[in-house]
């Protein structure tokens, strides 16, 4: 599906693959969403898997239950709830702040790479590696236990803000 210069609202869909330009996309519930977006917003209240690429797009996700894979440039990412069952979270961002809330019962390994950005909300994390030099930072470790799930976030010119849901 392709949308340009419009708005698209979907209440419930199993699988959605969409390309948008200058469009606001709203999905209430989906098992699997794949999107490529330029200039607009993408809001998803509940999804199993989300795979997305975007530029100049604001992203707001409610609850994610299986997997998240995002690449974003010049936008903002807000994620309200990474649920316990999510196996992989991968975010590559440039000029984008990443605000992500993870379930307190979500156990994961993490790897955070920042260039010209800061990590906040890291209380409770166990660091196995921590490098901070000039304008670059690298953090590796786990939350509660190692070897279960994986969270990887790379942010250039943006911050990573962690929270609990």
Image (cartoon, rainbow, N blue to C red):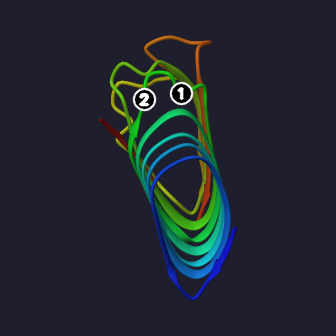
Q: Position of residue 15 (x, y in %)?
A: 63, 46
**Relative to 144, does residue 75 appear above or below in the rendering?**
below
Residue 93 position (above or below residue 2): above
Are dots 2 and 1 in contact, CB under 8 Å?
yes
Q: Which residue is mark 1?
A: 86
Identity of the residue drawn at 50% across and 11% down: 145
Depth check: give the residue in front, 81 or 134: 81
Residue located at (57% from left, 88% from top): 5
At mark 2, the secondary structure is loop
In the image, 34: left or right of 12?
A: right
Mark 2 highlights which residue? 83
Question: What is the x, y in percent for residue 34?
Answer: 66, 53
Q: Quadrant of residue 71?
A: bottom right
Write the residue at 54% across / 73% down. 57
Residue at (42, 29) in percent of width and height: 83
Quadrant (top left, top right, bottom left, bottom right) of the N terminus: bottom right
| Image coords of residue 80 (percent x, y) | 35, 46
How far apart are the alpha carbons under marks 2 and 1? Answer: 6 Å
Q: Nearer the viewer, residue 94 or 31?
A: 31
Residue found at the very far left of the displayed protein? 165
How many numbered badges does the structure rendering display?
2
Q: Secondary structure at mark 1?
A: loop
Image side of residue 129 versus residue 81, left or right: right
Q: Nearer the viewer, residue 6 or 69?
A: 6
Instruction: Report whether residue 10 is seen.
Output: yes
């Amino acid at each position: 599906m392709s949308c340009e210069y419009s708005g698209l609202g979907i209440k419930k869909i199993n699988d959605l693959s969409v390309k948008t330009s200058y469009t606001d996309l709203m999905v209430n519930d989906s098992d699997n969403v794949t999107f490529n977006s330029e200039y607009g917003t993408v809001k998803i209240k509940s999804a199993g898997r989300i795979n997305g690429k975007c530029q100049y797009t604001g992203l707001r996700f409610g609850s994610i239950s299986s997997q998240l894979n995002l690449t974003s440039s010049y936008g903002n990412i807000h994620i309200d709830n990474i649920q316990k069952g999510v196996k992989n979270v991968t975010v590559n961002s440039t000029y984008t702040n990443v605000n992500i809330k993870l379930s307190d019962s979500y156990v994961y390994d993490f790897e955070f790479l920042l260039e010209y950005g800061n990590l906040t909300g890291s209380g409770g994390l166990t660091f196995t590696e921590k490098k901070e030099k000039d304008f670059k930072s690298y953090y590796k470790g786990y939350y509660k236990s190692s070897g279960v799930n994986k969270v990887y976030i790379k942010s250039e010119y943006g911050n990573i803000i962690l929270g609990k849901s």
